[in-house]
């Protein structure tokens, strides 16, 4: 016998119905977007009245809602199944504790009455219901920073059980440079409140516990916010062919740019840093060929360490990043472009980073906003003043650790 699903429309007040009922053979299956048990098959619970039946159905209830759902009686529920269908959205779990989601149920003829009490979040809209909780982000500055903002916001949204939306996604450097592996929306017309990080490169776990619709920011530069990267560089296939055609195995990013300006507090790695990293790689892997991308080609050309390197010039930020990421070994200087080249690298190899990028005497406040263990992945190799001083103690004593030019 077929049962009506019109209660969905009533519950959600003309919003999309997220539950559908199916007849599968003589079994009753319930498809829910929220269930962890869903993978296109029905999981049998035998005589047990499913404890989960439907905590998920009533997660949108506000205060007390009693909904009668056409299901078999306890005696009929023998080998029946529930929760068939793919996982699509965890958003309605946001903000509810396990205690709030715990249902009570009872037998009422051929129906099971599910009753649950929940505190809604921003629940004054849509007839007192907010079926979707949003995590918003704005993509600012250059591509490397935008990748951090997007990936971290994506991870925070998943941790909150919310949906991610992006302000002004179309036409951005981000959208021109990457292909998304998940569907992302433009932000709706809704009330968002800001939720800012404790430091630009310092993991802040409180962002995942924020309630309601939030806009996260600003830099979000920590790998701990996300387990997976929800995008791929568009030029990755071209970059792979370029690296193979030129026979390069080591990609080096030399950023100088605004770090050359006095008073910024940023410390540029000296040429000795690149010499040290190249020596380490060639001792272990042989005489590998090098490609360098940089925003200061004149400085690169003046350094003997890069005398035999191929200089990749004239490319976009996405192309330069993709070339570096296509190499098995990457040596980064400072900045987000080199960071992402190491993070997106798919070939087995080593990654080096400059471990002392800040002069805390000039910018003491940065020390509270930057945490190396939150920024650099543990499998990467840091090379800083200590390692370089071991090669040239006299030069280090003369100030190599602070040299930026």
Image (tube, helix red, strand yellow):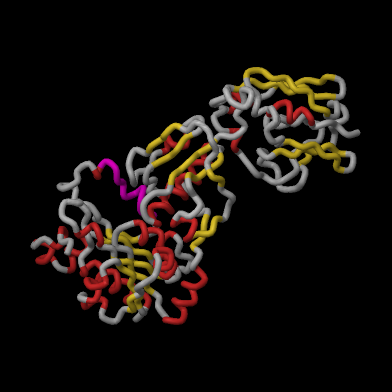
In the image, 113 versus 348, the foreground residue is 113
Q: Identify the residue shown where x is 37% and y is 73%.
A: 250
Q: Identify the residue shown where x is 15% and y is 47%.
A: 361
Q: Identify the residue shown where x is 32% and y is 41%.
A: 199
Measured from the top left, where is residue 351 in percent x and y?
37, 64
Q: Is residue 305 left or right of residue 175?
A: left
Q: What secondary structure characterizes most of the magenta part?
A: helix
- Tell me the quadrant of the picture where the C terminus can be found: bottom left
Measured from the top left, where is residue 365 in percent x and y?
22, 41
Numbered label tally: 0
> Which of the 4 image quadrants contains residue 130?
top right
In the image, 210 versus 355, the foreground residue is 210
From what the image shows, is residue 206 above or below residue 64? below
Q: Is residue 261 left or right of residue 41?
A: left
> Which of the 4 image quadrants contains residue 83?
top right
From what the image shows, is residue 192 above or below residue 367? above
From what the image shows, is residue 329 above or below residue 1? below
Measured from the top left, where is residue 297 in percent x and y?
27, 72
Q: Which residues are magenta?
A: 368-377
Measured from the top left, where is residue 211 in percent x and y?
49, 30
> Which of the 4 image quadrants contains residue 3?
top right
Q: Identify the residue shown where x is 16% and y is 48%.
A: 362
- Tell me the quadrant of the picture where the N terminus can be found: top right
Whether residue 279 is in magenta: the answer is no
């Amino acid at each position: 016998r077929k049962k009506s699903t019109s209660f969905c429309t009533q519950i959600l007040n003309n919003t999309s119905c997220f539950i559908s009922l199916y007849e599968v053979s003589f079994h009753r299956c319930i498809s829910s977007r929220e269930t962890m048990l869903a993978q296109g098959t029905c999981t049998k619970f035998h005589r047990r009245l499913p404890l989960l039946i439907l905590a998920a159905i009533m997660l949108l209830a506000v205060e007390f809602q009693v909904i009668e759902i056409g299901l078999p009686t306890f005696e009929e529920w023998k080998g029946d199944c529930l929760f068939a269908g793919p996982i699509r959205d965890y958003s309605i779990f946001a903000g509810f504790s396990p205690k709030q989601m715990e249902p009570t149920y009872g037998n009422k003829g051929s129906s099971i009455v599910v009753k649950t009490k929940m505190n809604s979040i921003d629940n004054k809209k849509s007839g007192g219901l907010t079926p979707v909780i949003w995590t918003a982000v704005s993509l600012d500055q250059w591509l490397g920073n935008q990748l951090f903002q997007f990936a971290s916001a994506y991870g925070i949204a998943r941790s909150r059980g919310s949906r991610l939306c992006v302000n002004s996604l179309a036409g951005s450097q981000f959208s021109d440079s990457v292909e998304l592996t998940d569907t992302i929306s433009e932000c709706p017309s809704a009330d968002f409140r800001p939720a800012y990080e404790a430091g630009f490169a310092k993991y802040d776990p409180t962002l995942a516990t924020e309630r309601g619709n939030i806009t996260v920011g600003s830099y979000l530069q920590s790998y701990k916010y996300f387990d997976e990267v929800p995008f791929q560089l568009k030029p990755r296939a071209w970059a792979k062919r370029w690296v193979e055609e030129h026979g390069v195995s080591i990609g080096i990013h030399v950023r100088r740019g605004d770090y050359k300006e006095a008073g910024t507090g940023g410390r540029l790695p000296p040429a000795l840093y690149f010499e040290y990293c190249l020596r380490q790689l060639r001792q272990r892997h042989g005489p590998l060929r090098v490609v360098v991308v940089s925003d200061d080609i004149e400085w690169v050309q003046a350094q003997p360490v890069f005398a035999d390197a191929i200089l990749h010039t004239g490319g976009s930020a996405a192309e330069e990043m993709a070339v570096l990421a296509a190499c098995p070994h990457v040596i980064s200087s400072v900045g987000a472009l080199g960071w992402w080249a190491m993070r997106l690298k798919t070939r087995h190899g080593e990654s080096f980073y400059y471990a002392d990028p800040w002069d805390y005497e000039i910018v003491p406040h940065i020390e509270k906003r930057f945490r190396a263990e939150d920024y650099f992945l543990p499998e990467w190799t840091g090379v800083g003043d200590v390692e370089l001083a071991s090669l040239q103690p006299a030069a280090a004593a003369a100030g190599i650790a602070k040299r930026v030019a």
